[in-house]
Amino acid sequence: MIEVQDLRKHFPGPKGSPAVRAVDGVSWAAGDARITGLLGPNGAGKTTTLRMLAGLLPPDAGTLHIDGIDVAAQPLQARARLGVLSDARGLYPRLTARENIVYYGRLQGLSDQAAQARASALADQLGLQPLMDRRTDGFSQGERMKTALARALVHDPSHIILDEPTNGLDVVATRALREVLRRLRDEQGKCIVFSSHIMQEVERLCDAVVVMSRGRTVASGSVDDLRTLSGHTDLEDAFVALAYGDAP
Ligand SMILES: Nc1ncnc2c1ncn2[C@@H]1O[C@H](COP(=O)(O)OP(=O)(O)OP(=O)(O)O)[C@@H](O)[C@H]1O
């Protein structure tokens, strides 16, 4: 389970301007064996929230817990339970897909043998086999995403966070990713959180949705709860009403 409580992060604004309130009082919880969507328009604070959860950025205030472990107080223990697929993907272009995955496994404390075995198992699971011994330089967006996902899963984390994972993916790759995430939820009980700005995408996959806007949590619940809360049956209308208030 992931719990985020009254999280805040401000960045200094350009000279003479007020600080950017990237995250300004965000609270939510994501349960095990569930897929939770962090839904918000551009600049809502989703990436900043996920970066703090991953221990990559210190919060100004608030707390983050993974299975009750305080990310600030015990970052290594928290990190061990977390698989992170960042927006940037961050693969080493001169290494093959296999080497990228194994290297990360080694960083996570796996033996070489265990990391190699995990890489092969994940390659089967994600349909990566034909790519495993190619350098990732020149990989397509979908190939990069699959490799980065395998790398995020190499240490078999119980929690997985994904920042806009379908960015740049075609419809087939998007469907394949959805299927993988469903299997991780249903067969392995993983706690999965992913960010998106597309309501329809969240509807197809998520058990629970947290709507963020301007650095705050503005609504949370099931997709049906959000429809009821906003008074709109059309999902796009519901999202616009919740995220932008009275905007068109
Ligand atoms: N390092 C930084 N320095 C200054 N401002 C930042 C920094 N990182 C993020 N911001 C600002 O914080 C706000 C929230 O950004 P964030 O990337 O978290 O939003 P997001 O919801 O992930 O948006 P998107 O969907 O466009 O990726 C934005 O206004 C952004 O410009």
Image: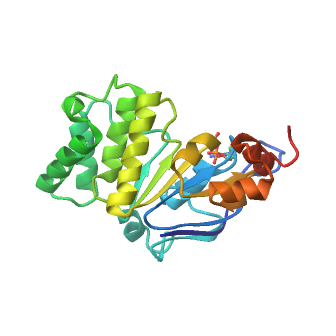
Q: Is residue 3 above or below residue 124?
A: below
Q: Is residue 40 above or below residue 28?
A: above
Looking at the image, can residue 10 be seen? no
The extreme top residue here reads 138
Percent across and percent down for residue 171 are 47, 29
Seen from the viewer's position, the closer of residues 96 and 58 is 96
Task: Give the residue at x 38% y 25%.
Answer: 140
Percent across and percent down for residue 28 are 62, 66
Residue 124 figure quarter: top left
Q: Is residue 226 left or right of residue 176?
A: right
Residue 149 figure quarter: top left
Where's ligand 1: which quadrant? Answer: top right
Q: Is residue 148 left or right of residue 22?
A: left
Seen from the viewer's position, the closer of residues 75 and 212 is 212
Percent across and percent down for residue 85 are 43, 47
Task: Give the residue at x 28% y 49%.
Answer: 104
Q: How many marks?
A: 0
Percent across and percent down for residue 60 are 65, 64
Seen from the viewer's position, the closer of residues 150 and 136 is 150
Q: Is residue 207 left or right of residue 62?
A: left
Looking at the figure, which quarter contains the C terminus?
top right
The extreme left residue here reads 113
Looking at the image, can residue 37 be seen? yes
Q: Is residue 224 left or right of residue 119?
A: right
